[in-house]
Image: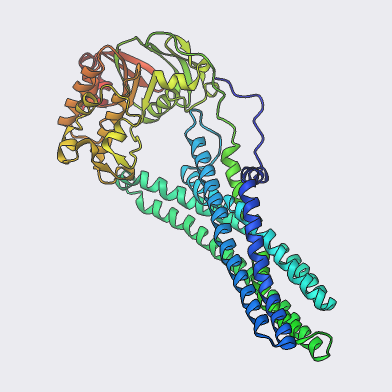
Protein backbone atom coordinates (compact mmCIF):
# COMPACT_ATOMS: atom_id res chain seq x y z
CA UNK A 1 0.00 0.00 0.00
CA UNK A 2 1.37 3.38 -0.96
CA UNK A 3 0.08 6.84 -0.43
CA UNK A 4 -1.18 8.31 -3.72
CA UNK A 5 1.00 11.01 -5.23
CA UNK A 6 -1.90 13.38 -5.56
CA UNK A 7 -5.11 13.35 -3.62
CA UNK A 8 -8.38 13.67 -5.42
CA UNK A 9 -9.86 17.12 -5.27
CA UNK A 10 -12.98 17.43 -3.22
CA UNK A 11 -16.17 17.10 -5.19
CA UNK A 12 -18.04 20.41 -4.89
CA UNK A 13 -21.61 20.43 -3.69
CA UNK A 14 -22.81 21.75 -7.05
CA UNK A 15 -21.61 18.53 -8.71
CA UNK A 16 -23.64 16.48 -6.24
CA UNK A 17 -26.73 18.59 -6.96
CA UNK A 18 -26.20 18.18 -10.71
CA UNK A 19 -25.91 14.42 -10.24
CA UNK A 20 -29.16 14.35 -8.28
CA UNK A 21 -30.94 16.34 -10.99
CA UNK A 22 -29.48 14.26 -13.83
CA UNK A 23 -30.59 11.00 -12.21
CA UNK A 24 -34.15 12.25 -11.83
CA UNK A 25 -34.70 14.13 -15.08
CA UNK A 26 -37.67 11.97 -16.07
CA UNK A 27 -39.44 12.33 -12.74
CA UNK A 28 -38.67 16.04 -12.62
CA UNK A 29 -40.04 16.59 -16.13
CA UNK A 30 -43.27 14.74 -15.32
CA UNK A 31 -43.49 16.52 -11.99
CA UNK A 32 -42.96 19.89 -13.66
CA UNK A 33 -45.66 19.14 -16.25
CA UNK A 34 -48.18 18.00 -13.64
CA UNK A 35 -47.38 20.77 -11.15
CA UNK A 36 -47.41 23.30 -14.01
CA UNK A 37 -50.84 21.99 -14.97
CA UNK A 38 -51.92 22.36 -11.35
CA UNK A 39 -50.66 25.93 -11.17
CA UNK A 40 -52.22 26.75 -14.55
CA UNK A 41 -55.55 25.35 -13.35
CA UNK A 42 -55.34 27.35 -10.14
CA UNK A 43 -54.54 30.50 -12.12
CA UNK A 44 -57.33 29.79 -14.59
CA UNK A 45 -59.87 29.62 -11.76
CA UNK A 46 -60.11 33.38 -11.03
CA UNK A 47 -59.80 34.08 -14.77
CA UNK A 48 -62.77 31.77 -15.37
CA UNK A 49 -64.72 33.44 -12.57
CA UNK A 50 -64.13 36.83 -14.17
CA UNK A 51 -65.31 35.53 -17.54
CA UNK A 52 -68.37 33.94 -15.93
CA UNK A 53 -69.33 37.23 -14.30
CA UNK A 54 -68.74 39.05 -17.57
CA UNK A 55 -70.89 36.71 -19.70
CA UNK A 56 -73.58 36.21 -17.07
CA UNK A 57 -74.13 39.92 -16.69
CA UNK A 58 -74.17 40.34 -20.48
CA UNK A 59 -76.29 37.34 -21.55
CA UNK A 60 -78.16 36.42 -18.34
CA UNK A 61 -78.92 32.87 -19.64
CA UNK A 62 -79.22 29.58 -17.74
CA UNK A 63 -77.26 27.76 -20.45
CA UNK A 64 -74.25 30.03 -20.01
CA UNK A 65 -74.42 29.49 -16.26
CA UNK A 66 -74.46 25.68 -16.67
CA UNK A 67 -71.53 25.82 -19.09
CA UNK A 68 -69.65 27.98 -16.60
CA UNK A 69 -70.32 25.49 -13.80
CA UNK A 70 -69.07 22.66 -16.05
CA UNK A 71 -65.90 24.64 -16.82
CA UNK A 72 -65.30 25.20 -13.10
CA UNK A 73 -65.82 21.47 -12.45
CA UNK A 74 -63.24 20.60 -15.12
CA UNK A 75 -60.78 23.06 -13.62
CA UNK A 76 -61.30 21.65 -10.12
CA UNK A 77 -60.74 18.11 -11.42
CA UNK A 78 -57.56 19.14 -13.24
CA UNK A 79 -56.25 20.93 -10.17
CA UNK A 80 -56.99 17.99 -7.88
CA UNK A 81 -55.57 15.22 -10.08
CA UNK A 82 -52.50 17.14 -11.25
CA UNK A 83 -51.56 18.05 -7.64
CA UNK A 84 -52.07 14.50 -6.41
CA UNK A 85 -50.03 12.79 -9.12
CA UNK A 86 -47.48 15.58 -9.44
CA UNK A 87 -46.57 15.50 -5.74
CA UNK A 88 -46.59 11.70 -5.78
CA UNK A 89 -44.02 11.65 -8.59
CA UNK A 90 -41.82 14.32 -7.00
CA UNK A 91 -41.92 12.95 -3.46
CA UNK A 92 -41.15 9.44 -4.65
CA UNK A 93 -38.14 10.76 -6.57
CA UNK A 94 -37.09 12.89 -3.57
CA UNK A 95 -37.30 9.96 -1.14
CA UNK A 96 -35.48 7.62 -3.53
CA UNK A 97 -32.69 10.13 -4.14
CA UNK A 98 -32.25 10.74 -0.40
CA UNK A 99 -31.97 6.96 0.06
CA UNK A 100 -29.28 6.78 -2.63
CA UNK A 101 -27.16 9.43 -0.95
CA UNK A 102 -27.60 7.87 2.48
CA UNK A 103 -26.41 4.54 1.11
CA UNK A 104 -23.52 6.27 -0.67
CA UNK A 105 -22.32 8.02 2.48
CA UNK A 106 -22.71 4.82 4.52
CA UNK A 107 -20.75 2.88 1.87
CA UNK A 108 -17.86 5.33 2.25
CA UNK A 109 -17.74 4.54 5.94
CA UNK A 110 -17.71 0.81 5.24
CA UNK A 111 -14.85 0.89 2.74
CA UNK A 112 -11.93 -1.40 3.64
CA UNK A 113 -9.61 1.61 3.38
CA UNK A 114 -10.53 4.45 5.71
CA UNK A 115 -11.04 7.90 4.16
CA UNK A 116 -9.45 11.06 5.44
CA UNK A 117 -12.66 12.98 6.16
CA UNK A 118 -11.53 14.69 9.34
CA UNK A 119 -15.01 14.00 10.75
CA UNK A 120 -16.17 11.92 13.69
CA UNK A 121 -18.69 9.12 13.33
CA UNK A 122 -21.47 11.27 14.80
CA UNK A 123 -20.85 13.95 12.19
CA UNK A 124 -20.90 11.39 9.39
CA UNK A 125 -24.20 10.08 10.78
CA UNK A 126 -25.74 13.57 10.55
CA UNK A 127 -24.49 13.92 6.98
CA UNK A 128 -25.94 10.52 6.07
CA UNK A 129 -29.37 11.52 7.39
CA UNK A 130 -30.23 15.22 7.54
CA UNK A 131 -27.83 16.40 4.84
CA UNK A 132 -28.80 13.58 2.48
CA UNK A 133 -32.48 14.49 2.90
CA UNK A 134 -31.91 18.20 2.34
CA UNK A 135 -29.72 17.57 -0.71
CA UNK A 136 -32.42 15.39 -2.28
CA UNK A 137 -34.92 18.23 -1.82
CA UNK A 138 -33.47 19.80 -4.97
CA UNK A 139 -35.40 17.16 -6.96
CA UNK A 140 -38.66 18.62 -5.63
CA UNK A 141 -37.61 22.25 -5.44
CA UNK A 142 -36.81 22.78 -9.14
CA UNK A 143 -40.20 21.58 -10.53
CA UNK A 144 -42.10 23.59 -7.92
CA UNK A 145 -39.99 26.63 -8.79
CA UNK A 146 -40.73 26.25 -12.51
CA UNK A 147 -44.45 25.60 -11.96
CA UNK A 148 -44.71 28.65 -9.69
CA UNK A 149 -43.03 30.71 -12.39
CA UNK A 150 -45.59 29.43 -14.91
CA UNK A 151 -48.39 30.49 -12.60
CA UNK A 152 -46.98 33.98 -12.15
CA UNK A 153 -46.47 34.36 -15.91
CA UNK A 154 -50.04 33.25 -16.69
CA UNK A 155 -51.38 35.72 -14.13
CA UNK A 156 -49.23 38.52 -15.53
CA UNK A 157 -50.34 37.81 -19.13
CA UNK A 158 -54.01 37.59 -18.13
CA UNK A 159 -53.84 40.87 -16.22
CA UNK A 160 -51.83 42.45 -19.02
CA UNK A 161 -54.56 41.53 -21.54
CA UNK A 162 -57.09 43.25 -19.29
CA UNK A 163 -54.84 46.23 -18.60
CA UNK A 164 -51.18 46.66 -19.48
CA UNK A 165 -50.35 48.51 -16.20
CA UNK A 166 -51.65 45.53 -14.18
CA UNK A 167 -49.47 43.05 -16.10
CA UNK A 168 -46.38 45.25 -15.79
CA UNK A 169 -47.07 45.72 -12.08
CA UNK A 170 -47.06 41.95 -11.48
CA UNK A 171 -43.88 41.42 -13.50
CA UNK A 172 -41.99 44.31 -11.91
CA UNK A 173 -43.17 43.34 -8.42
CA UNK A 174 -42.10 39.73 -8.89
CA UNK A 175 -38.61 40.75 -10.04
CA UNK A 176 -38.24 43.12 -7.08
CA UNK A 177 -39.36 40.47 -4.58
CA UNK A 178 -36.97 37.85 -5.94
CA UNK A 179 -34.08 40.33 -5.98
CA UNK A 180 -34.55 41.13 -2.30
CA UNK A 181 -35.04 37.51 -1.26
CA UNK A 182 -32.10 36.16 -3.27
CA UNK A 183 -29.79 38.36 -1.19
CA UNK A 184 -31.36 37.11 2.05
CA UNK A 185 -31.19 33.47 0.94
CA UNK A 186 -27.38 33.61 0.86
CA UNK A 187 -27.39 34.43 4.56
CA UNK A 188 -29.67 31.44 5.15
CA UNK A 189 -27.33 29.11 3.27
CA UNK A 190 -24.29 30.24 5.30
CA UNK A 191 -26.13 30.03 8.62
CA UNK A 192 -27.63 26.63 7.80
CA UNK A 193 -24.24 25.20 6.86
CA UNK A 194 -22.77 26.34 10.17
CA UNK A 195 -25.79 25.03 12.08
CA UNK A 196 -25.49 21.58 10.47
CA UNK A 197 -21.79 21.47 11.32
CA UNK A 198 -22.42 22.34 14.97
CA UNK A 199 -25.30 19.89 15.32
CA UNK A 200 -23.07 17.21 13.79
CA UNK A 201 -20.31 17.99 16.29
CA UNK A 202 -22.82 17.73 19.14
CA UNK A 203 -23.98 14.37 17.77
CA UNK A 204 -20.39 13.15 17.56
CA UNK A 205 -19.75 14.29 21.13
CA UNK A 206 -22.77 12.46 22.55
CA UNK A 207 -21.83 9.32 20.58
CA UNK A 208 -18.37 9.43 22.13
CA UNK A 209 -19.91 9.95 25.57
CA UNK A 210 -22.20 6.94 25.22
CA UNK A 211 -19.34 4.78 24.04
CA UNK A 212 -17.03 5.82 26.87
CA UNK A 213 -19.55 6.26 29.68
CA UNK A 214 -18.39 3.24 31.70
CA UNK A 215 -14.68 4.18 31.82
CA UNK A 216 -15.59 7.84 32.38
CA UNK A 217 -17.51 6.83 35.50
CA UNK A 218 -14.55 4.70 36.52
CA UNK A 219 -12.12 7.58 36.91
CA UNK A 220 -14.66 10.29 37.67
CA UNK A 221 -14.43 12.09 34.36
CA UNK A 222 -18.13 11.92 33.55
CA UNK A 223 -18.94 15.39 34.94
CA UNK A 224 -16.19 17.05 32.90
CA UNK A 225 -17.36 15.14 29.82
CA UNK A 226 -20.95 16.27 30.38
CA UNK A 227 -19.80 19.89 30.73
CA UNK A 228 -17.93 19.53 27.44
CA UNK A 229 -21.07 18.18 25.75
CA UNK A 230 -23.20 20.95 27.26
CA UNK A 231 -20.85 23.55 25.78
CA UNK A 232 -20.98 21.97 22.30
CA UNK A 233 -24.74 21.50 22.52
CA UNK A 234 -25.21 25.12 23.61
CA UNK A 235 -23.24 26.29 20.57
CA UNK A 236 -25.49 24.18 18.34
CA UNK A 237 -28.59 25.59 20.08
CA UNK A 238 -27.43 29.19 19.65
CA UNK A 239 -26.69 28.63 15.97
CA UNK A 240 -30.10 26.98 15.52
CA UNK A 241 -31.71 30.07 17.07
CA UNK A 242 -29.73 32.25 14.66
CA UNK A 243 -30.96 30.18 11.71
CA UNK A 244 -34.53 30.37 13.03
CA UNK A 245 -34.25 34.17 13.26
CA UNK A 246 -32.89 34.42 9.72
CA UNK A 247 -35.61 32.09 8.43
CA UNK A 248 -38.23 34.08 10.31
CA UNK A 249 -36.97 37.35 8.88
CA UNK A 250 -36.93 35.81 5.41
CA UNK A 251 -40.48 34.48 5.75
CA UNK A 252 -41.73 37.78 7.18
CA UNK A 253 -40.16 39.86 4.41
CA UNK A 254 -41.42 37.44 1.74
CA UNK A 255 -44.95 37.50 3.14
CA UNK A 256 -44.92 41.29 3.48
CA UNK A 257 -43.66 41.84 -0.07
CA UNK A 258 -46.15 39.35 -1.51
CA UNK A 259 -49.02 40.94 0.38
CA UNK A 260 -47.88 44.39 -0.77
CA UNK A 261 -47.87 43.24 -4.40
CA UNK A 262 -51.31 41.62 -4.04
CA UNK A 263 -52.71 44.76 -2.42
CA UNK A 264 -51.16 46.92 -5.12
CA UNK A 265 -52.75 44.81 -7.87
CA UNK A 266 -56.14 44.92 -6.12
CA UNK A 267 -56.05 48.68 -5.54
CA UNK A 268 -54.84 49.37 -9.08
CA UNK A 269 -57.58 47.16 -10.54
CA UNK A 270 -60.18 48.92 -8.38
CA UNK A 271 -59.01 52.31 -9.55
CA UNK A 272 -59.03 51.17 -13.21
CA UNK A 273 -62.57 49.78 -12.82
CA UNK A 274 -63.71 52.98 -11.11
CA UNK A 275 -62.21 54.94 -14.01
CA UNK A 276 -63.99 52.70 -16.49
CA UNK A 277 -60.81 51.30 -18.05
CA UNK A 278 -61.70 47.69 -17.17
CA UNK A 279 -65.02 45.89 -16.79
CA UNK A 280 -66.58 44.39 -13.66
CA UNK A 281 -65.65 40.88 -14.87
CA UNK A 282 -62.03 41.96 -15.34
CA UNK A 283 -62.09 43.50 -11.86
CA UNK A 284 -63.29 40.20 -10.37
CA UNK A 285 -60.53 38.41 -12.28
CA UNK A 286 -57.89 40.90 -11.10
CA UNK A 287 -58.98 40.70 -7.44
CA UNK A 288 -59.07 36.89 -7.63
CA UNK A 289 -55.62 36.70 -9.23
CA UNK A 290 -54.24 39.16 -6.66
CA UNK A 291 -55.39 36.86 -3.88
CA UNK A 292 -54.30 33.67 -5.65
CA UNK A 293 -50.91 34.92 -6.77
CA UNK A 294 -49.72 35.13 -3.15
CA UNK A 295 -49.40 31.33 -2.91
CA UNK A 296 -47.22 30.76 -6.02
CA UNK A 297 -45.25 33.87 -5.11
CA UNK A 298 -44.69 32.45 -1.63
CA UNK A 299 -43.49 29.16 -3.12
CA UNK A 300 -41.46 31.01 -5.72
CA UNK A 301 -39.81 33.19 -3.08
CA UNK A 302 -39.15 30.21 -0.76
CA UNK A 303 -37.26 28.27 -3.42
CA UNK A 304 -33.98 30.23 -3.22
CA UNK A 305 -33.85 29.40 0.49
CA UNK A 306 -34.29 25.68 -0.14
CA UNK A 307 -31.76 25.75 -2.97
CA UNK A 308 -29.17 27.30 -0.65
CA UNK A 309 -29.95 24.74 2.07
CA UNK A 310 -29.61 21.91 -0.44
CA UNK A 311 -26.30 23.28 -1.64
CA UNK A 312 -24.97 23.65 1.91
CA UNK A 313 -25.90 20.04 2.65
CA UNK A 314 -24.38 18.86 -0.63
CA UNK A 315 -21.11 20.58 0.24
CA UNK A 316 -21.06 18.76 3.58
CA UNK A 317 -21.71 15.46 1.84
CA UNK A 318 -18.79 16.20 -0.46
CA UNK A 319 -16.54 16.18 2.63
CA UNK A 320 -17.26 12.46 2.94
CA UNK A 321 -17.79 11.39 -0.67
CA UNK A 322 -14.68 13.10 -2.02
CA UNK A 323 -12.36 12.46 0.90
CA UNK A 324 -9.13 10.80 -0.26
CA UNK A 325 -8.26 7.37 1.12
CA UNK A 326 -5.84 7.27 4.02
CA UNK A 327 -3.72 4.91 1.94
CA UNK A 328 -3.74 3.35 -1.51
CA UNK A 329 -3.95 -0.47 -1.14
CA UNK A 330 -1.83 -2.94 -3.05
CA UNK A 331 -3.13 -5.75 -5.23
CA UNK A 332 -1.35 -8.88 -3.98
CA UNK A 333 -2.72 -11.67 -1.83
CA UNK A 334 -0.97 -13.38 1.10
CA UNK A 335 0.98 -16.51 0.24
CA UNK A 336 -0.27 -19.80 1.69
CA UNK A 337 0.58 -20.04 5.36
CA UNK A 338 -0.45 -18.32 8.56
CA UNK A 339 2.75 -16.68 9.74
CA UNK A 340 2.71 -13.16 11.13
CA UNK A 341 5.91 -11.14 11.33
CA UNK A 342 6.61 -7.72 12.82
CA UNK A 343 10.03 -6.56 11.66
CA UNK A 344 11.59 -3.54 13.41
CA UNK A 345 8.38 -1.49 13.48
CA UNK A 346 8.70 2.05 14.80
CA UNK A 347 5.45 3.93 15.39
CA UNK A 348 4.45 6.03 18.37
CA UNK A 349 5.59 4.16 21.46
CA UNK A 350 6.77 1.15 19.42
CA UNK A 351 10.57 1.42 19.17
CA UNK A 352 11.78 -1.21 16.72
CA UNK A 353 9.30 -3.92 17.71
CA UNK A 354 10.34 -7.27 16.25
CA UNK A 355 8.79 -10.73 16.63
CA UNK A 356 7.36 -13.58 14.57
CA UNK A 357 4.34 -15.77 15.19
CA UNK A 358 4.71 -19.12 13.39
CA UNK A 359 1.72 -20.70 11.69
CA UNK A 360 -0.58 -22.48 14.12
CA UNK A 361 0.88 -20.95 17.30
CA UNK A 362 -1.14 -19.34 20.08
CA UNK A 363 0.93 -16.32 21.13
CA UNK A 364 0.10 -13.89 23.89
CA UNK A 365 1.58 -10.38 24.02
CA UNK A 366 1.87 -8.71 27.41
CA UNK A 367 2.36 -5.01 26.71
CA UNK A 368 3.21 -3.06 29.83
CA UNK A 369 2.09 0.22 28.23
CA UNK A 370 -1.56 0.30 27.03
CA UNK A 371 -0.61 2.71 24.27
CA UNK A 372 1.77 0.18 22.75
CA UNK A 373 -0.99 -2.44 22.74
CA UNK A 374 -3.40 -0.05 21.00
CA UNK A 375 -0.82 0.99 18.38
CA UNK A 376 0.14 -2.60 17.60
CA UNK A 377 -3.52 -3.55 17.16
CA UNK A 378 -4.11 -0.53 14.90
CA UNK A 379 -1.17 -1.45 12.66
CA UNK A 380 -2.32 -5.06 12.32
CA UNK A 381 -5.88 -3.88 11.57
CA UNK A 382 -4.51 -1.66 8.73
CA UNK A 383 -5.89 1.41 10.46
CA UNK A 384 -2.41 2.93 10.19
CA UNK A 385 -1.02 3.32 6.65
CA UNK A 386 2.23 1.34 6.15
CA UNK A 387 4.04 4.50 5.11
CA UNK A 388 3.17 6.06 8.48
CA UNK A 389 5.53 3.76 10.36
CA UNK A 390 9.04 2.42 9.90
CA UNK A 391 9.68 -1.28 9.51
CA UNK A 392 7.70 -4.03 7.84
CA UNK A 393 4.70 -6.17 8.72
CA UNK A 394 4.43 -9.47 6.85
CA UNK A 395 1.33 -11.61 6.60
CA UNK A 396 1.69 -15.03 5.05
CA UNK A 397 5.27 -14.15 4.10
CA UNK A 398 4.34 -11.02 2.11
CA UNK A 399 4.61 -7.38 3.09
CA UNK A 400 1.40 -5.76 4.26
CA UNK A 401 2.08 -2.74 2.03
CA UNK A 402 1.69 -4.81 -1.12
CA UNK A 403 -1.51 -6.61 -0.16
CA UNK A 404 -5.04 -5.60 -1.05
CA UNK A 405 -7.05 -4.65 2.02
CA UNK A 406 -9.78 -7.15 1.03
CA UNK A 407 -7.18 -9.96 1.04
CA UNK A 408 -5.85 -8.81 4.41
CA UNK A 409 -9.37 -8.77 5.86
CA UNK A 410 -9.96 -12.32 4.62
CA UNK A 411 -6.66 -13.57 6.03
CA UNK A 412 -6.37 -11.73 9.35
CA UNK A 413 -9.01 -10.46 11.77
CA UNK A 414 -8.17 -7.96 14.50
CA UNK A 415 -10.98 -7.83 17.05
CA UNK A 416 -10.90 -4.70 19.27
CA UNK A 417 -11.76 -4.86 22.93
CA UNK A 418 -14.69 -2.46 22.37
CA UNK A 419 -16.28 -4.18 19.36
CA UNK A 420 -19.59 -2.63 18.30
CA UNK A 421 -22.86 -4.46 18.96
CA UNK A 422 -25.64 -3.82 16.45
CA UNK A 423 -29.40 -3.85 16.70
CA UNK A 424 -30.60 -7.29 15.61
CA UNK A 425 -30.44 -10.80 17.00
CA UNK A 426 -27.63 -12.59 18.78
CA UNK A 427 -27.24 -14.73 15.67
CA UNK A 428 -26.96 -11.79 13.28
CA UNK A 429 -24.37 -10.16 15.55
CA UNK A 430 -22.25 -13.31 15.77
CA UNK A 431 -22.59 -14.35 12.14
CA UNK A 432 -23.67 -11.30 10.07
CA UNK A 433 -23.16 -13.06 6.73
CA UNK A 434 -24.86 -16.29 7.85
CA UNK A 435 -21.97 -18.39 6.50
CA UNK A 436 -20.06 -19.42 9.62
CA UNK A 437 -19.46 -23.16 9.90
CA UNK A 438 -18.52 -23.07 13.57
CA UNK A 439 -21.26 -20.86 15.03
CA UNK A 440 -22.20 -23.27 17.88
CA UNK A 441 -18.53 -23.83 18.75
CA UNK A 442 -17.89 -20.07 18.81
CA UNK A 443 -20.86 -19.50 21.12
CA UNK A 444 -19.65 -22.21 23.46
CA UNK A 445 -16.01 -21.10 23.40
CA UNK A 446 -16.93 -17.51 24.28
CA UNK A 447 -19.13 -18.72 27.14
CA UNK A 448 -22.12 -16.99 25.60
CA UNK A 449 -24.21 -20.09 26.18
CA UNK A 450 -25.70 -18.67 29.38
CA UNK A 451 -27.05 -15.64 27.48
CA UNK A 452 -28.54 -17.91 24.81
CA UNK A 453 -30.08 -20.19 27.43
CA UNK A 454 -31.46 -17.26 29.42
CA UNK A 455 -33.95 -16.36 26.69
CA UNK A 456 -36.46 -18.69 25.08
CA UNK A 457 -35.67 -17.20 21.66
CA UNK A 458 -32.10 -18.51 21.98
CA UNK A 459 -29.84 -17.11 19.28
CA UNK A 460 -32.84 -15.24 17.86
CA UNK A 461 -33.06 -13.05 20.98
CA UNK A 462 -33.33 -9.39 19.94
CA UNK A 463 -30.36 -7.21 20.84
CA UNK A 464 -30.79 -3.45 21.02
CA UNK A 465 -28.50 -0.92 19.39
CA UNK A 466 -25.05 -0.93 21.03
CA UNK A 467 -26.18 -3.94 23.05
CA UNK A 468 -27.96 -1.72 25.57
CA UNK A 469 -29.98 -4.67 26.91
CA UNK A 470 -26.82 -6.69 27.60
CA UNK A 471 -24.30 -6.32 30.39
CA UNK A 472 -20.71 -5.27 29.71
CA UNK A 473 -19.47 -8.84 30.05
CA UNK A 474 -22.19 -10.17 27.75
CA UNK A 475 -21.35 -7.58 25.10
CA UNK A 476 -17.67 -8.50 25.29
CA UNK A 477 -18.39 -12.21 24.99
CA UNK A 478 -20.71 -11.54 22.06
CA UNK A 479 -17.93 -9.64 20.30
CA UNK A 480 -15.52 -12.50 21.02
CA UNK A 481 -18.00 -15.05 19.66
CA UNK A 482 -18.23 -13.03 16.44
CA UNK A 483 -14.42 -13.01 16.08
CA UNK A 484 -14.18 -16.77 16.70
CA UNK A 485 -17.06 -17.56 14.34
CA UNK A 486 -15.20 -15.79 11.51
CA UNK A 487 -12.61 -18.61 11.68
CA UNK A 488 -9.89 -16.58 9.94
CA UNK A 489 -6.38 -17.84 9.27
CA UNK A 490 -4.88 -15.32 11.69
CA UNK A 491 -6.90 -14.00 14.63
CA UNK A 492 -5.73 -11.09 16.78
CA UNK A 493 -7.66 -10.38 19.97
CA UNK A 494 -7.09 -7.35 22.17
CA UNK A 495 -8.17 -7.64 25.81
CA UNK A 496 -11.12 -9.95 25.05
CA UNK A 497 -11.97 -10.71 28.70
CA UNK A 498 -11.58 -7.46 30.65
CA UNK A 499 -15.30 -7.32 31.51
CA UNK A 500 -15.84 -10.94 32.64
CA UNK A 501 -15.30 -12.53 36.01
CA UNK A 502 -12.22 -14.59 36.84
CA UNK A 503 -13.94 -17.99 36.60
CA UNK A 504 -15.47 -17.24 33.22
CA UNK A 505 -12.13 -15.82 32.07
CA UNK A 506 -10.40 -19.12 32.87
CA UNK A 507 -12.98 -21.07 30.86
CA UNK A 508 -12.85 -18.63 27.93
CA UNK A 509 -9.04 -18.84 27.80
CA UNK A 510 -9.07 -22.64 27.64
CA UNK A 511 -11.86 -22.63 25.06
CA UNK A 512 -10.02 -20.20 22.78
CA UNK A 513 -6.89 -22.34 22.91
CA UNK A 514 -8.93 -25.47 22.15
CA UNK A 515 -11.04 -23.96 19.33
CA UNK A 516 -8.06 -22.24 17.68
CA UNK A 517 -5.67 -25.18 17.98
CA UNK A 518 -3.59 -25.36 14.80
CA UNK A 519 -4.61 -21.82 13.75
CA UNK A 520 -2.47 -18.74 14.28
CA UNK A 521 -3.81 -16.72 17.21
CA UNK A 522 -2.42 -13.60 18.87
CA UNK A 523 -3.92 -12.20 22.07
CA UNK A 524 -2.78 -8.80 23.33
CA UNK A 525 -3.64 -9.00 27.02
CA UNK A 526 -2.56 -8.82 30.64
CA UNK A 527 -4.97 -11.56 31.70
CA UNK A 528 -3.15 -14.35 33.59
CA UNK A 529 -5.69 -16.88 32.31
CA UNK A 530 -5.06 -16.05 28.64
CA UNK A 531 -1.31 -15.73 29.17
CA UNK A 532 -1.27 -19.17 30.78
CA UNK A 533 -3.28 -20.73 27.95
CA UNK A 534 -0.89 -19.40 25.27
CA UNK A 535 1.92 -21.47 23.78
CA UNK A 536 4.28 -18.52 24.15
CA UNK A 537 4.24 -15.11 25.82
CA UNK A 538 6.04 -12.05 24.44
CA UNK A 539 6.69 -9.22 26.88
CA UNK A 540 6.65 -5.75 25.30
CA UNK A 541 8.13 -2.92 27.37
CA UNK A 542 9.08 0.52 26.09
CA UNK A 543 8.09 -0.52 22.58
CA UNK A 544 10.34 -3.58 22.22
CA UNK A 545 10.19 -7.27 23.13
CA UNK A 546 12.13 -7.63 26.38
CA UNK A 547 11.35 -11.25 27.25
CA UNK A 548 9.60 -14.34 25.96
CA UNK A 549 8.66 -17.76 27.22
CA UNK A 550 5.73 -19.51 28.81
CA UNK A 551 3.58 -17.69 31.34
CA UNK A 552 4.63 -19.94 34.22
CA UNK A 553 8.27 -19.79 33.24
CA UNK A 554 8.23 -15.98 33.15
CA UNK A 555 6.52 -15.85 36.53
CA UNK A 556 9.49 -17.62 38.08
CA UNK A 557 12.25 -15.79 36.21
CA UNK A 558 10.97 -12.25 35.55
CA UNK A 559 10.01 -10.22 38.61
CA UNK A 560 8.72 -7.27 36.56
CA UNK A 561 6.46 -9.60 34.59
CA UNK A 562 5.19 -11.18 37.79
CA UNK A 563 4.28 -7.77 39.23
CA UNK A 564 2.63 -6.64 35.97
CA UNK A 565 0.33 -9.60 35.35
CA UNK A 566 -0.37 -11.07 38.76
CA UNK A 567 -3.81 -10.11 40.04
Q: Position of residue 39 (x, y in %)?
A: 65, 66
Q: Nearer the viewer, residue 526 or 448?
A: 448
Q: Nearer the viewer, residue 556 or 104?
A: 104
Quarter-wise, where is residue 431 in the image? top left
Q: Position of residue 461 (x, y in %)?
A: 23, 41
Quarter-wise, where is residue 23 in the image? top right
Left or right placement of residue 156 versus residue 223 in this view: right
Q: Is residue 43 visible?
A: yes
Q: Residue at x 62, y 55 (%)?
A: 31
Q: Residue at x 30, y 11 (%)?
A: 360
Name of the residue lying farthest toward the bottom: 274
Total labels drawn: 0
* Quadrant the N terminus occupies: top right
Quarter-wise, where is residue 334 in the image? top left
Left or right placement of residue 103 versus residue 538 in this view: right
Q: Nearer the viewer, residue 434 or 191?
A: 434
Q: Residue 170, relative to residue 213: is it above or below?
A: below
Q: Residue 463, relative to residue 42: is it above or below?
A: above
Q: Position of residue 364 (x, y in %)?
A: 29, 19
Q: Residue at x 40, y 23 (%)?
A: 542
* Quadrant the C terminus occupies: top left
Give the colour scheme shown. Answer: rainbow
Q: Is residue 186 visible?
A: no
Q: Position of residue 487 (x, y in %)?
A: 31, 20
Q: Residue 259, relative to residue 508: is it above or below?
A: below
Q: Residue 170, relative to residue 534: is it above or below?
A: below
Amino acid sequence: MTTPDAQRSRRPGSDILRTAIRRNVGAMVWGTVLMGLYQAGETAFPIALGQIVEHTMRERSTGSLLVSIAVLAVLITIVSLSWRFGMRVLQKANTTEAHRWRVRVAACGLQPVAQDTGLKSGEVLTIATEDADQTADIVEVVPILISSMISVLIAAVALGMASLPLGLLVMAGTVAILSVLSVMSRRIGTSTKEQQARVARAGAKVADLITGLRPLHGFGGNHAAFRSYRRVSTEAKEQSITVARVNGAYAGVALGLNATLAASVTLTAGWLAFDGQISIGQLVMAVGLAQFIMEPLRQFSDMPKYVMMARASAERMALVLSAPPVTAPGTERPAPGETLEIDCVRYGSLQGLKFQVPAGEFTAIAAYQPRAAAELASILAVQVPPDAYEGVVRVGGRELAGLSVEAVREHILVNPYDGEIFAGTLRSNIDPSGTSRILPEAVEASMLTDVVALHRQGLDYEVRDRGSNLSGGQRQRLSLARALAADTDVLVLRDPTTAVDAVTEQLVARNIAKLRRGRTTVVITSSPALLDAADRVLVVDDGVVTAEGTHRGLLTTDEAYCLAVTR
